[in-house]
Amino acid sequence: MSDSCPLTKLSELLQPVSRSERVDPTKEYRLLGVRLEGGGPFHRDTIQGSQSAATTLYKVKKGDFIYSRLFACRGAFGVINSDLDGCYVSGEFPTFVAIEDRVDVHFLKLWFRLPTTIRRVDSNCTGSTPLTRNRFKENFFLNLDIPLPPIKEQRRIVAKTDELANKIEKARELQDRTASETETLLSLEISHLFSKAGEKGWTVGHLSDYVLDDCYGTSEKTTNDISGTPILRMGNIQNGRLDLRDLKYLHLNAKDRRRLLLEKGDILVNRTNSAELVGKCAVFDMEGEYSFASYLIRIRLDKDRAEPSLVASYINSPTGRAYMFSERKQMTGQANVNATKLKALPIALPPLEEQRHIVAYLDRLQVKVEALKKLQAQTAAELDALLPSILDKAFKGEL
């Protein structure tokens, strides 16, 4: 923004407003919060007055400028839109109306998204305890000065910024959709391969035809004692692979060690989870000794007849997921698939050599998918950086 723009204190541009109401126990109140990082006000909850811990609430109206005292240092500023007109806040959300011929509240909202502004806010946050140390008092807020161009120029900047922000949002939606499609590409290809099983003369049967042994994991209480054996749990199965973060440990006795230690090629299946996630699986391919917890089933295949990676990929594919969903036993808040249902999964497999060729093909496809996901992540980061760049240009007079 041009250096010629005068600095004007917010106290000259905004007027505090307090539409206080004593809480009526029989009345319904729509309560607001304010999102961080410039996300603005949102409908947080609807309660009866009898549920309110406060005796007084404050009504807000369309066009009000509002912020959270406690989270101002994290960008919790915004403007009340028409959808939130007539909602209520507690006394922790100072509210103001703009002097309309002096400042556009949306221009002010943009200014409070600048990192330089938030740093100034953070430097003025006060409080003597951890709970109150971040509160941004109204006297500090109103004492802030803003470089203020004429109202017409403010509105032009707002309109131009909104136009560019909308384009960024559309690009982000497209990027998110592409990322979602990339995520499902591999599983859809697996389903497609198996859908042609009949045409190719693959052997049709059930998972049990290839299982040498199955076993439920340990229900013993695990600890953080790393001198024990690492225990894989349901959270360690992520997107068809093993994630070794957040491991727990257990000292296994000799009998359990023989039964519960994993071998390379074992398939771990999550038998208890939400209905959407129950049955997810991964192949154990780690060096060293590992065991597994009771919410998992270990499936050990005859590797002279079935390639574990291909079988696991099929279980994780849309076809396998649909079977698990249909065969689940729903419990309170969770679903369960037992070993009997798991082994009854219909599956058709080609000869072992062809299975290995398919696994090699899927591995090559996985490499391409990972490269595409990396590129998409870079694009997402670039999109995230665009709006701050636009705001910086706007307030330097370069927009």
Image: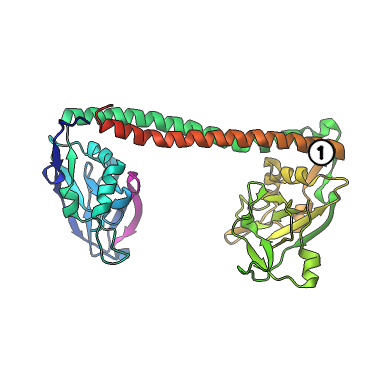
Taking the spot 84% from the left edge, 31% from the top edge, the residue there is 200
Q: x and y percent of residue 189 in the render?
A: 70, 34
Q: x and y percent of residue 53 in the render?
A: 29, 66
Q: Which amino acid lies under the numbered mark 1 shown in the image of this protein? A: Arg
Taking the spot 64% from the left edge, 57% from the top edge, the residue there is 234
- Left or right, 110 with respect to 300, comes to left
Q: Quadrant of residue 167?
A: top left
**Image quadrant occupied by the N terminus:** top left
Q: x and y percent of residue 207 in the render?
A: 81, 49
Q: As rendered, which of 79 and 319 lies closer to the eye? A: 79
- Left or right, 276 with respect to 41, comes to right
Q: As rendered, which of 4 and 162 lies closer to the eye? A: 4
Residue 44 highlighted magenta (yes or no): yes
**Magenta segment boundaries in residue numbering:** 34-49
- In the rendered image, which residue does mark 1 sit on? 356
Q: Quadrant of residue 328?
A: bottom right
Q: As rendered, which of 372 and 166 lies closer to the eye? A: 372
Q: Is residue 55 visible to the viewer in this orientation of the structure? A: yes
Q: Is residue 293 visible to the viewer in this orientation of the structure? A: no
- Left or right, 298 with respect to 41, comes to right
The outermost residue toward the bottom is 253
Taking the spot 82% from the left edge, 38% from the top edge, the residue there is 355
Q: Quadrant of residue 235?
A: bottom right
- What secondary structure is marked by label 1? helix
Magenta: main secondary structure equals: strand
Q: As rendered, which of 87 and 26 lies closer to the eye? A: 87
Q: x and y percent of residue 162 in the render?
A: 31, 31
**Image quadrant occupied by the C terminus:** top left
Residue 329 highlighted magenta (yes or no): no
For disc 1, the neighbor class at 10 Å (few under 14, some 14 to 19, many from 20) is some
